[in-house]
Amino acid sequence: QQQVRQSPQSLTVWEGETAILNCSYENSAFDYFPWYQQFPGEGPALLISILSVSNKKEDGRFTIFFNKREKKLSLHIADSQPGDSATYFCAASQGGNTGANTGKLTFGHGTILRVHP
Amino acid sequence: EAGVTQSPRYAVLQEGQAVSFWCDPISGHDTLYWYQQPRDQGPQLLVYFRDEAVIDNSQLPSDRFSAVRPKGTNSTLKIQSAKQGDTATYLCASSFQGANTGQLYFGEGSKLTVL
């Protein structure tokens, strides 16, 4: 049972465009949603995260839009750069809003992003 | 500050052989996680510890996999009698529960190939 789903599986954009990566989840108890970035041969690294009490989170060129009612979120990467080419994982966990986040993350399968110069 | 360190980076085994992976978390991090990442998939939690105690090992195939963190610092994940289906990258991550950020810091992983 895939509790966190991501689409598309892969995405190619031109440098300067906005890349949009989608994520949906099933478990209503999830309240913390981080996005991790992974380069080949490396471990995932936290890029940006959001709690379910918010509907938007921005950090530079990266923005998360969150829709609790539909159990969907998306990561927008503005002004995409070739260095953004990587695999992006949407993840989810419980306890973020209550101060009891276990860090026990459920990951999606990932979206492979390629940015062409 | 040193990151999460894992060794070995690569291992190639025949079916039935055993292997151990070692992890040194970030200093001061009380929580340590082992994730399995099959090729072209997201990481899947196997087990996690708070200090030396196992908090959740429900996804650890207990008949062949074992994990310990005896002093609440370094950890070892062992696979006995490996199968081809165990081929994956094994990621160790650590965090500090008191920070309550939920952020995990991952190592580079140990890539296992079972022939």
Image (spheres, rainbow, N blue to C red):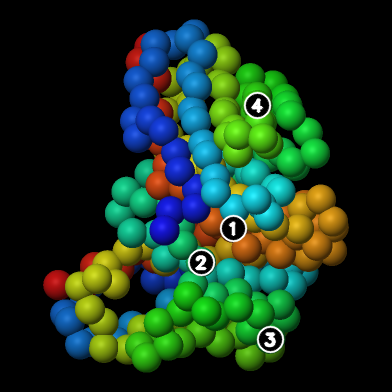
* Residue designated by label 3: B53
Task: Check contact, mark 3 vs mark 2: CB within 8 A.
Answer: no
What secondary structure is marked by label 2? strand
Task: Check contact, mark 1 vs mark 3: CB within 8 A.
Answer: no
- For the view shown, which residue lies furthest in the top direction? A16
* Residue designated by label 2: B45
Q: Which amino acid, mark 1?
A: Leu
User: Which residue is rendered at x = 45% and y = 43% of the image?
Assistant: A5
Distance between the alpha carbons at the discs numbered 3 and 2: 16 Å
Q: Quadrant of the N terminus of chain A?
A: bottom left
Chain at numbered mark 4 = A
Give the x, y percent position of residue B83: 22, 78
Q: Quadrant of the C terminus of chain A?
A: top left
What secondary structure is marked by label 4? strand
What secondary structure is marked by label 3? strand
Distance between the alpha carbons at the discs numbered 2 and 1: 7 Å
* Residue designated by label 4: A65
Q: Which mark is residue A105?
A: 1
